[in-house]
Image (cartoon, helix red, strand yellow):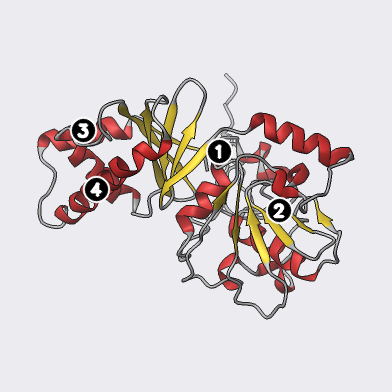
Amino acid sequence: MAKRSAVKSKTTADGINPRQACPCGSGKRYKACHGLSGGPIEVPVGRPFEGVAGECELIALREFVPSATAPLALSVDTDRTVTLATVLPMAAAGLVRVDGSAFVGLQVQTRSSDVSRDVARALRWVLEAKPGDVLGVVGPETEEGDDRERLQDMIDVKAALEPTLHTDFSWWLPEGEEPTGEVALSLERANEAIMPTERIGPAAYWVDAGDRAHLRWVRPEPEEQLLLALARLSARGDLGLGEGSRFAGSFRAHGVLVPVWDLDREQHAREWTKPAEELGARLDEALASLEKDPLTGEERRARDGLIGRQVTIR
């Protein structure tokens, strides 16, 4: 009988088995993902906006708020003011209008392992671009110069981010200007797809999804701590916002947890402002109580149920 030869698993220079899952978290095998280029693997930054006072608002604007703008408090030397935007015409990463006003888009294709770096590179571009220039996408990254800047290096990280929500995308153009060509088509498509959204508290957004409304609330606490607090409220029946509401689950985005509630869409967004404030106070109380009171058996079972209703989108 012929001897069976042992097959050794080959590994890359980084010690990665090409048949194993890619460390980037894509779900593909390494050889079918980052291994295709043969270059070194760069692990994605799990919490790219950490340390920024407006972290939760940044995540909301990037992930689910359809049309909003917010002025950036810059810490770099420049005379140009820059507005952060959810979506720009044709999903551009940045643009400078002919009047010199500059915009950076958040809902764009990610080109590196660090979203903060991508936004910073678009920001650096608009600070140096000429009026009328448009940056379609952030270009290939390099290891040189300002390409290693992150958003935290270019803004006042202690400044609050105060978004202004819009009912459409007419703010894309200066007042009185009519859209033409590709911009007109992009504007039409964007307006057709927009979901009515209102901000009812810090990083707390009411969204009308058509068949129902939701509260999507980006929370800054460490995921495990927030889960324990949510479980404590759930076990005692305090996790809702009152009649017409139901806790639906949560999703992870850029290193933080975003709890979601289903809401009665017949009620106006403003009617949920006070219930959301009261729920926030209950959450703060539950978080504080964790320091001295561990979860009971019932609360642990509630936590396990909450974990089963989580998904990850970034």
Amino acid of disc 3: Ala
Q: Amino acid at mark 2?
A: Gly
Q: Which residue is mark 4?
A: 283
Amino acid type assigned to the residue bearing label 1 in the image:
Gln
- The mark that comes first in sequence, 4 or 2, is 2
Q: Residues within 10 Å of mark 1 (few under 14, many from 20)?
A: few
Asked if 82 appears above or below 238 in the picture, the reply is below
Q: Which mark is residue 302?
A: 3
Residue 123 quadrant:
bottom right
Q: Secondary structure at mark 3?
A: helix
Callout 1 secondary element: loop
Q: Which residue position is annotated with label 1? A: 20
Q: Position of residue 244 (x, y in %)?
A: 31, 25
SS class of the residue under badge 4?
Answer: helix
Residue placed at 51% from the left, 61% from the top?
Answer: 161
Q: Quadrant of residue 96?
A: bottom right
- Per the image, the residue denoted by label 2 is 39
Q: Position of residue 57 (x, y in %)?
A: 49, 53
Residue placed at 70% from the left, 49% from the top?
Answer: 171
50 up-or-down from 245: above or below: below
Question: In screen coordinates, is 65 left or right of 80?
Answer: left
Which of the marked residues, 4 or 1, is nearer the chain's N terminus?
A: 1
Front position among marks 4 and 2: 4
Which percent across, then down, holds residue 263? Answer: 37, 28
* Mark 2 crowdedness (10 Å alpha carbons): few <14, some 14-19, many ≥20: few
